[in-house]
């Protein structure tokens, strides 16, 4: 069955595994200059997503991944970790005729939004209750909000499909290669989470912070299971 030649729409959910180069250059340089161990830019990823494509070939998608690299570190002063979390949502366009019957090649263009956090916990913990009452701080949870473009080129191959003739509805599985780039357009000011206090409506702004820029090149394999419906005459 050649999906590229059938008039149909399809909906699927997919899991992904891949590689990402996400250097966080400004943050890594700042930590390195301060004598801290920096994060490894090269990382494996695991993720999941949702895809819908209409009869016209235009559709939308949403996806997210998390990195598998080491995120926790320590030195003589603090234990620290970074935590990136971003979700992409956007549009995709599937041409009705592709180069081969076996492969469908198409672009995706999305916006990602999320946060990059840097959590620091001092090793010289203030464990006395009275000192805590006087303002002794054991932790700093810092974060920046990120907004940017996620652009990718995709190549999918149908693994199998079954169509019920009486309803013209079927199920299918596909495997796809996705190569893309996350381009950061905006990072907010750095803020200190203080949401434990109902009297502080906004998290505190931290000055002199580097940019937490999540721009990244990535390659991943997607495996999807979904349903399709042929256009009724």
Image (cartoon, grey):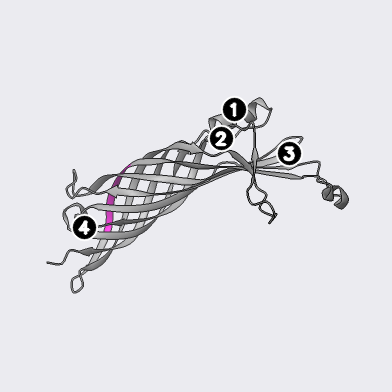
Q: CA distance from mark 4 to mark 1?
A: 48 Å
Location of the N terminus (image quadrant)? bottom left
Instruction: Of the two numbered discs 4 and 3 on the same chain, state the one appearing first in sequence.
Output: 4
Q: CA distance from mark 4 to mark 2?
A: 43 Å
The kind of secondary structure element at disc 3 is strand
Q: Nearer the viewer, mark 2 or mark 1?
A: 1
Q: Residue at x 59, y 27 (%)?
A: 29
Instruction: Of the two numbered discs 4 and 2 on the same chain, state the one appearing first in sequence.
Output: 2
Q: Pick whichever, 116 or 94, lies toward us.
A: 116
- Quarter of image, res 75: top right
Q: Nearer the viewer, mark 4 or mark 2?
A: 4
The kind of secondary structure element at disc 1 is helix
The segment highlighted magenta reads 153-160
Q: Pick whichever, 124 or 136, lies toward us.
A: 136
Task: Return the mark for residue 78.
Answer: 3
Q: Which residue carries the number 2 mark?
A: 40
Task: Return the mark for residue 29.
Answer: 1
- Quarter of image, res 112: top left
The kind of secondary structure element at disc 2 is loop
Instruction: Of the two numbered discs 4 and 1 on the same chain, state the one appearing first in sequence.
Output: 1
């Amino acid at each position: 069955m050649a999906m590229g030649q059938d008039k149909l729409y399809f909906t699927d959910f997919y899991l992904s595994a891949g590689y990402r180069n996400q250097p966080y250059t400004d943050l890594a340089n700042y930590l390195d200059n301060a004598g801290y161990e920096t994060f490894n830019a090269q990382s494996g990823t695991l993720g999941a997503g949702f895809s819908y494509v209409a009869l016209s070939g235009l559709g939308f998608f949403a996806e997210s991944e998390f990195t598998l690299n080491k995120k926790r570190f320590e030195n003589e002063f603090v234990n620290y970790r970074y935590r990136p979390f971003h979700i992409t949502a956007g549009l995709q366009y599937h041409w009705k005729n592709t180069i081969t019957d076996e492969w469908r090649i198409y672009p995706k263009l999305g916006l990602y939004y999320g946060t990059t956090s840097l959590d620091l916990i001092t090793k010289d913990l203030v464990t006395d209750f009275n000192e805590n009452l006087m303002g002794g701080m054991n932790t700093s949870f810092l974060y920046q909000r990120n907004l940017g473009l996620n652009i990718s080129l995709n190549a999918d191959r149908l693994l199998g499909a079954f169509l019920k003739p009486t309803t013209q509805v079927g199920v299918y599985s596909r495997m796809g290669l996705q190569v893309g780039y996350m381009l950061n357009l905006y990072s907010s000011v750095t803020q200190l989470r203080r949401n434990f206090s109902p009297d502080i409506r906004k998290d505190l702004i931290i000055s002199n912070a580097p940019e937490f820029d999540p721009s990244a090149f990535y390659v991943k394999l997607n495996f999807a299971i979904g349903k399709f419906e042929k256009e009724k005459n």
